Image (cartoon, rainbow, N blue to C red):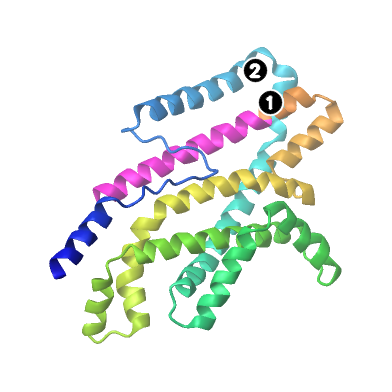
Amino acid sequence: MAEIKDIKKQVQEEHKPTVIAVTDSVAIPRKKDVGMFTAWRISFVGAIGIVAYLVIFNRDPYWEILKFLPDGILVTFQVTIESIILALIIGLFTGIGRISKNRFINGIASIYVEVVRGIPLLVQLFYIYFALGRIVNIPATASAVIAMAVCYGAYMGEICRAGIEAIPKGQMEAARSLGMTYRQAMIHVILPQAVKTILPPVGNEFVALLKDSSLVSILAVSDLLRRGREFASESFTYFETYTMVALVYLIITLFLSKLISIMEERISVD
């Protein structure tokens, strides 16, 4: 019977379903994926080349548009960085809650993940700024950061949960056998190892969040898209303005995707 069980276990392991990771972030240009790496180089160099061409040979209005956007770029990064930091904190506690043996804690974390992931980010932005705004006056930028952090915190929670569960159970057992409490083992043994696993997907979420930050322009936050809308409404150069805004977004996201690729390579080497 033991031999039959071992054979069944071996067969199950050999026929595990392939997990397909789907994300709304940009594709990461890995050197082993020659096609994607080449496409990234063409896209990145091409986007910079188009911007340079438009600014040099069509100075008016493209140069004026480009000069009008830096403030919005800074606000976009500010909102994105603040949101991702808060989302990581929320995600860490959510991930730990999702693997907790306490039914109440596990239930609360699971409900949070399911509810938040089931509501579009735009609806959450409206709810926090307009609906809750009738009870508590929350500034537009703060509302944007809170909404995106709450939304992405649910995704970060699942990433953290998967990263923690990827660590062999023997690590926790060994730490507990040395006299560590569950909390000490989690802080000093499990989480440091899980960081390597969760860093790449966290980087993907950072890029996805940066793209989704364009939604905060609806709340009158002067991000990149909002600044573009302001310029277009004043000059009526809608085609030129949104072309430049799209190219700037593309350059930023492609640049960040390359940084994530470099980070993944260094982690794999370590």
* Residue 207 percent location from the top left of the image: 53, 45
* Residue 27 percent location from the top left of the image: 47, 37
Left or right, residue 87 beside residue 213:
left
Q: Amino acid at mark 2?
A: Leu
Name which residue lies at 46% across and 53% down: 202
SS class of the residue under badge 2? helix
Query: Residue 27's mark?
Result: none
Q: Nearer the viewer, residue 125 or 50?
A: 125
Query: Residue 54's mark?
Result: 2
Quarter of the rendering containing residue 226: top right
Q: Which residue is under mark 1?
A: 243
Left or right, residue 127 beside residue 170:
right
Q: Nearer the viewer, mark 1 or mark 2?
A: 1
Name which residue lies at 32% across and 70% down: 190
Quarter of the rendering containing residue 86: bottom right
Between marks 1 and 2, how big is the CA–CA gap?
10 Å
Q: Residue furthest left?
A: 3
Q: Nearer the viewer, residue 118 or 236?
A: 118
Q: Name the dominant secondary structure of the magenta segment.
A: helix
SS class of the residue under badge 1? helix
Number of marks in picture: 2
* Residue 35 percent location from the top left of the image: 39, 26
Q: Is 4 contained in the magenta span?
A: no
Asked if 148 appears above or below 1 in the picture, the reply is above
Task: Please state the extent of the stretch shown in magenta in the rendering.
Answer: 245-270
- Label 1 with label 2: CB-CB less than 8 Å: yes
Left or right, residue 268 beside residue 41:
left
Name which residue lies at 31% across and 78% down: 185
